[in-house]
Amino acid sequence: MGPLGGTHQFPKATISSVLAPSLRRQLMVTLDENPFFQLNRKELELLQRFRERTVVTITPAKAILRYRDEIAKLACIHPFLMHAAITVTMLHNRHLTGMADAKLSATEAFHYYQSIALFNDKLSRPLQGSERDALWVAAGILGTISFGHIEAKSPEEAWPLKPPSSLDFNWLSLSEGKVEVWRITNVLETQFRQLALEHMNFPTTIPAGPGLEALPSELSVLCRFNASSTAENNPYYTVALSVAQALNLTCNYNTNMLFFRFSMTMGSEYKRLLVRKDPGALLLLAYWYAKACQHGHWWIVGRAALECQAICIFLEKYHRHDSNVQRLLQFPKLVLACLNRRDTVGDLASFSTA
């Protein structure tokens, strides 16, 4: 008898189908060596769903066929990655069944916190073998969970309308932490080197321009842009450039990658402006959220829509006498209105900031 509550036999069509016999044995060793990591049949089925369905929604399209099985195999060897995979799959299940809840269930919370604890513990030790690969993948999945799970059920419960909390920008902190994990794991020496290069070199893969001129003139005035503006002398500059490039791109692989890279463009001064709820910083984030809503990805649209709506309400309330701010709200408000319609995809694709 083994830790699965029966013999070490997998149910039909489980994750074992992608594993060589040696890796199936490794999964059993992983379970036996981790007494607090007992998988039942349902959790094994979640791992299978992760491989067959969920991983496809969180990995760039160009990479998915090449890396799907490798990620599944790593999840069977490394508990911190297995917990992360189970968590993100459970959240995906909720979305697909329309049973989303603001709070993590006890089981989701258990797997999520186990993943974080084991992940941090592994980072504190010398890395060996495939641990580098698994840590890099886990960092991405944990970032997805952090962004994809939002406890607010309404805009009033979402930032920036809700009372301040140290967790308000937790998703952004994890995004920054992912870059540090890339450094620690030396990702260019892992089996995911090509995928990492796609992320790192992304700015060279999209057409040059448009630049800041693509933004509404009122937004340029609000952010104090002029001919001499640079990333060094204007805290809005890099974020605004990313928004300008995203606004006129269709929703495809490139804009998907642009989403992943956006948070990396936020400098420390821009983040301080967000914390202070500066209208220029809020509007740039609202425009990015509005564009992100066009993707329709399950783990993006929830937070993007709620916090975008919360920003609009906040700016309508506290900057109602600023006509430029009110005009600039038209674009994100139109996107949000369309998001509630059945023909969302068709309508969103035609939106313009003009």
Image (cartoon, rainbow, N blue to C red):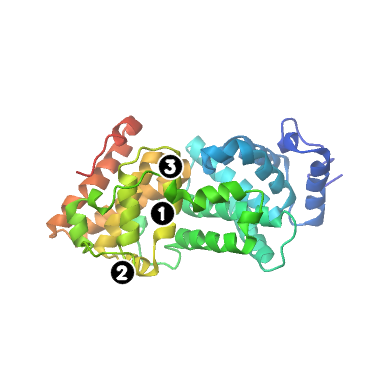
Badge 3 marks a residue whose secondary structure is helix
Badge 1 local density, few (<14 within 10 Å), some, or many (20+)? some
Q: CA distance from mark 2 to mark 1?
A: 20 Å
Q: 65 or 160: which is nearer to us?
A: 65
The disc at residue 254 is 3
Q: Amino acid at mark 3?
A: Asn
Q: Is residue 323 left or right of residue 197?
A: left
Classify the position of the N terminus by image quarter.
Answer: top right
Q: Amino acid at mark 1?
A: Phe
- Residue 193: x and y, percent? 61, 50
Q: Which is more N-terminal, label 2 or label 3?
A: 3
Q: Amino acid at mark 2?
A: Arg
Badge 1 marks a residue whose secondary structure is helix
- Residue 316: x and y, percent? 20, 56
Q: Is residue 107 left or right of residue 316?
A: right
Q: Residue at x 16, y 51 (%)?
A: 327
Q: Which residue is mark 1?
A: 262
Classify the position of the C terminus by image quarter.
Answer: top left
The disc at residue 276 is 2
Q: 262 or 202: which is nearer to us?
A: 202
Q: CA distance from mark 1 to mark 3?
A: 12 Å
Quarter occupied by residue 271 = bottom left
Residue 320 versus residue 194 in the image, above or below: below
The disc at residue 61 is none
Between marks 3 and 2 in the image, the one whose residue lies nearer the viewer: 3
- Residue 145: x and y, percent? 53, 51
Q: Residue at x 79, y 43 (%)?
A: 23
Between marks 1 and 3 in the image, the one whose residue lies nearer the viewer: 3
